[in-house]
Amino acid sequence: MVDPDGRELVMSCGAALAHLCVALRGLGHDAEVSTFPDPGDADLLAIVAGGGRHTPDAGDRELFQAIETRRTHRAEFAAGPVAPRSLALLRTEAESAGADLTVVTGEERQDIVTLVGEGDRVQFGDSAFRRELAAWMRPNHTRRRDGIRGDAMGLGAVTSLVAPTIVATFDTGGRQATKDQRLAQASPALLVLSTAGDAPADWLSAGQAVALLLLRATAEGLGASFLNQPIEVPVLRDRLRTRLGGDTHPQLLLRVGRASTGAGSLRRPVADVLAQRGR
Ligand SMILES: Cc1cc2nc3c(=O)[nH]c(=O)nc-3n(C[C@H](O)[C@H](O)[C@H](O)COP(=O)(O)O)c2cc1C
């Protein structure tokens, strides 16, 4: 429901691809990447070969080390601006993967905060969206290894047990809009990641870009979280695009700031997502 074209799905694969390359370089190998290598197989997004020796520099090492500690921070960030130098580093990472990063400020930012609330109201007004979201919500004490635990959304143990039923049953869009608009408003930095085109190759680039910028943010001591609702609702995405000048396609909306640490995220075991040839 939330991603009918597989746009964010391809971005997620782009994020995995970037992590693979960061890991290869961190471990001392060149990463040779060929994207969409087979025109007859649109699902084959990339082939990565470990190339010759690569001597990791400080930047490679920082990104590699950030893999284990990076996670999405959904709570409010500490007050205080993000250093312009850090924002410039995030932009450099995004650009290295072929995407653009815009730090939105002033009236533009205010309009985007409004769009976030509108996005929540549209999405939560749709019972199929709510059921899908509920299916990915997990209690704080879960044996499952995927989905989003209640504590990652600021829920206590008991609330985390009932939250999926509440989300699936009632339209809580108004409350969600108030909460997300407050988070967007209070966020030290609001960033839009965008690409020149809007085809699967652009989505893959956006995924690589967001992975690199999130790892760099972690290395800079920053946390990040998503407010993608105005990009996931097509009519709002058009409005956002126009508001940003109409030249590029918004792919992700992020808030960034200083975050306290907290419970780690659920992660699938590597064996679940890695198929080995011949096995
Ligand atoms: C392309 C993409 C889009 C995402 N969109 C959202 C989103 O709209 N809301 C959200 O809360 N998290 C979003 N996430 C974050 C994922 O839920 C999160 O990365 C995943 O649950 C693993 O948790 P971690 O980031 O803490 O490792 C997105 C992640 C990616 C890669």
Image (cartoon, grey):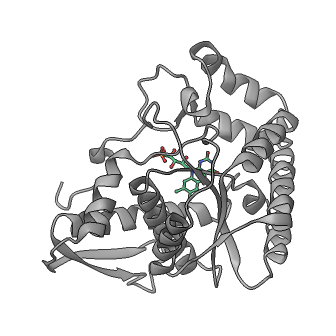
Q: Residue at x 82, y 67 (%)?
A: 108
Classify residue 196 as left or right of residue 241.
left
Q: Residue at x 45, y 86 (%)?
A: 39
The image quarter containing residue 13 is bottom left
The image quarter containing residue 272 is top left
The image quarter containing residue 26 is bottom left
46 up-or-down from 15: above or below: below
Judge whether residue 6 can be spotted in this image: no
Q: Residue at x 83, y 43 (%)?
A: 126
Classify residue 80 as left or right of residue 86.
right
Q: Residue at x 46, y 45 (%)?
A: 71
Q: In the rendered image, which quarter contains the C terminus?
A: bottom left
Task: Locate residue 208, reporting x and y percent.
Answer: 46, 69
Task: Locate residue 63, reporting x and y percent.
Answer: 33, 61
Task: Locate residue 91, reporting x and y percent.
Answer: 53, 73
Q: How many marks?
A: 0
Question: Nearest the camera: 116 or 173?
Answer: 116
184 up-or-down from 233: above or below: above
100 up-or-down from 278: above or below: below
Question: Nearest the camera: 186 or 163?
Answer: 186
Question: Nearest the camera: 122 or 58?
Answer: 58
Judge whether residue 205 can be spotted in this image: yes
Q: Residue furthest left?
A: 53
Classify residue 3 as left or right of residue 141.
right
